[in-house]
Image (spheres, helix red, strand yellow):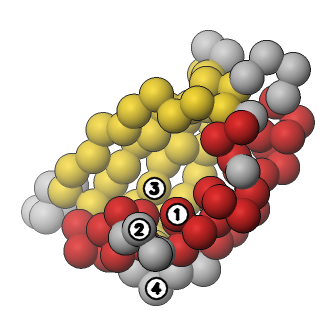
């Protein structure tokens, strides 16, 4: 599995908007072939989004393609108007687990 942990900071006063639009984006990601897990939680006033994909190729196809579903969902929801992406850690999990 290819795992991605993304960190987001909400614009003050726009948490409800971020929650609403973030759910729409997560639903798009969940519907993609190759996505195995998409979930999130709040930690210290920031949001952490955990993504699991079958492999790095699936992640790149879904998230990094400039014409792909993630980029389109961001544009459609204007998610980045309610929160700022702080960065992500990512990598392949241990294949022997």
Question: In this orientation, does residue 39 appear?
Answer: yes
Q: How far, Cα to Cα, is label 4 from label 3?
A: 13 Å
Q: Mark 1 points at which residue?
A: 71
Mark 3 or mark 1, which has the lower sequence index?
3
From what the image shows, is residue 35 above or below residue 38? below
Q: What element carries label 1?
A: helix
Residue at x 48%, y 48% (from the top left corner): 50
- The quarter of the picture where residue 41 lies is top right
Q: How far, Cα to Cα, is label 2 from label 3?
A: 18 Å
Left or right side of 29 for 63: left
From what the image shows, is residue 28 above or below residue 9? below
Q: Nearer the viewer, mark 2 or mark 4?
A: 2
Other-residue count near label 3 (Cα within 10 Å), few / some / many at <14 / 14–19 / ≥20: many
Q: What element carries label 3?
A: strand
Q: Name the residue under label 3.
A: 51
Which numbered circle lies on residue 33?
4
Q: Name the residue under label 2.
A: 66
Question: In this orientation, does residue 53 appear?
Answer: no
Mark 1 or mark 4, which has the lower sequence index?
4
């Amino acid at each position: 599995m290819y795992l991605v942990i993304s960190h987001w900071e909400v614009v003050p006063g726009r948490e409800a908007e971020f929650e609403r639009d973030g759910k729409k984006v997560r639903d798009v990601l969940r519907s993609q072939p190759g996505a195995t897990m998409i979930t999130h939680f709040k930690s210290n006033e920031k949001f952490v989004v955990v993504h699991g994909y079958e492999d790095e190729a699936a992640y790149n196809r879904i998230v990094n393609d400039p014409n792909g579903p993630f980029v389109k969902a961001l544009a459609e929801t204007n998610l980045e108007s309610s929160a700022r992406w702080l960065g992500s850690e990512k990598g392949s999990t241990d294949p022997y687990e």
